[in-house]
Image (cartoon, rainbow, N blue to C red):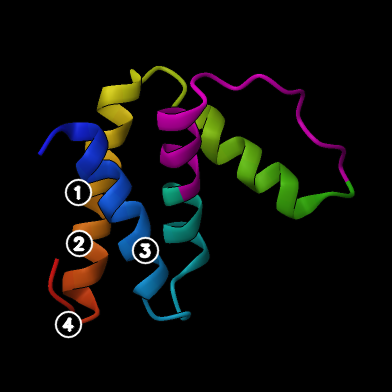
Amino acid sequence: MGLKEKFEEHAEKVKTLPAALSNEDMLILYGLYKQATVGPVNTSRPGMLDLKGKAKWDAWKAVEGKSKDEAMGDYITKVKQLLEAAGMSS
């Protein structure tokens, strides 16, 4: 199974995680997912009243230097960690 297939599999597994993920974990996953699927940030930072949008944009911007393959690998690793922490098999 190639990296892209593993990435897509783990992107589906994320949906099975408990809803009680921390905001930090959700933002890490978001940033890595966007970097892996879209690449570097291609939008301007949301305005000061859009706190959620700014947090998501910042999480994506934080991993901007990673290649798509690096981001996919890091995403898979993070999902595995979260699945193990939740007592689920990865």
The earlier-in-sequence mark between 1 and 3 is 3
Q: Residue 81 carries which label?
A: 2
Q: In which quarter of the image is the N terminus?
A: top left
Quote the CA–CA distance across marks 2 and 4.
10 Å
Q: Which mark is nearer the camera, 3 or 4?
A: 3
Q: Is residue 4 above or below residue 65?
A: below
**Residue at horizontal 33 percent and vertical 18 percent from the top:** 67
Comparing 10 with 50, the one in front is: 10
Can you give x and y, in whole percent of width and height, for residue 51 in the image? 77, 52
Range drawn in magenta: 30-48
Label 4 crowding class (10 Å Cα cut-off): few <14, some 14-19, many 20+?
few
Dot 3: element: helix
Q: In which quarter of the image is residue 45?
A: top right
**Residue at horizontal 36 percent and vertical 63 percent from the top:** 14
Comparing 64 with 3, the one in front is: 3
Label 3 crowding class (10 Å Cα cut-off): few <14, some 14-19, many 20+?
some
Quote the CA–CA distance across marks 1 and 2.
6 Å
Dot 4: element: loop
Answer whether residue 17 is magenta in the image. Answer: no
Q: Name the residue under label 4.
A: 87
Q: Name the residue under label 1.
A: 77
Q: Which mark is residue 14?
A: 3
Dot 2: element: helix
The earlier-in-sequence mark between 2 and 3 is 3
